[in-house]
Amino acid sequence: MRDLGGRTALVTGGSAGVGLACARRLLQFGANVVITARDEARLAEAAASLGAPQRVMGIAWDVADTDRAPSVLASVVDRFGALHVLVNNAGTNSRGALDELSP
């Protein structure tokens, strides 16, 4: 599927590397793109580098703060109407048995 016109994608960890590359590609396919990252300065720089301010939104967010997820989603919906694609690129490094880890 290469036509994502009218769709909105959220890319966590979108300020650099694989996340930023995904955001660029999604824009090429016509999607509105929301990128998130912990570092606000890097996030603003990354959003500006994408070159489509009407179709790009940056949200400073540490995905480990799961309580904030509903407000992030609400911001996406307020701006673009819906969320259609999620690229879960950000991560944490938690070690242990899965059933012993917190969300």
Image (cartoon, rainbow, N blue to C red):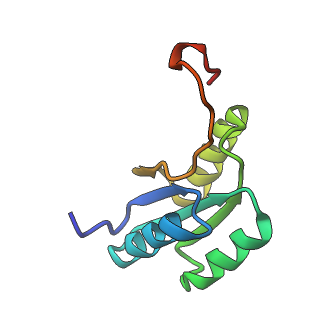
Q: Is residue 6 above or below residue 55?
A: above
Q: Residue furthest front?
A: 96
Instruction: Say which quarter of the image contains residue 97.
Output: top right
The spot of residue 77 in percent (x, y) is 56, 50
Q: Which residue is more in the foreground, 73 or 45?
A: 45
Picture residue at 71% right of the left edge, 31% below the top = 67
**Residue at x 62%, y 42% (from the top left corner):** 92
Residue 94 sits in quarter: top right
Looking at the picture, does residue 48 appear above or below residue 35? below
Q: Please give the count of numbered marks on the rendered protein.
A: 0
Q: Residue at x 54, y 82 (%)?
A: 52
Q: Which of the 4 image quadrants contains residue 48?
A: bottom right
Residue 22 appears left or right of 59:
left
Point out the residue furthest to the top here: 99
| Residue 53 vertical placement versus 15 (above, below) | below
Give x and y (percent) for residue 10: 51, 55
Q: Give residue 100's position: percent from left, percent from top.
A: 60, 14
Q: Is residue 3 left or right of residue 103?
A: left
In the image, residue 57 sits, relative to residue 88, either above or below, namely: below
| Quadrant of the snapshot with the N terminus | bottom left
| Quarter of the image where the C terminus is located | top right
Q: Nearer the viewer, residue 90 or 1?
A: 90
Q: Position of residue 88 (x, y in %)?
A: 48, 48
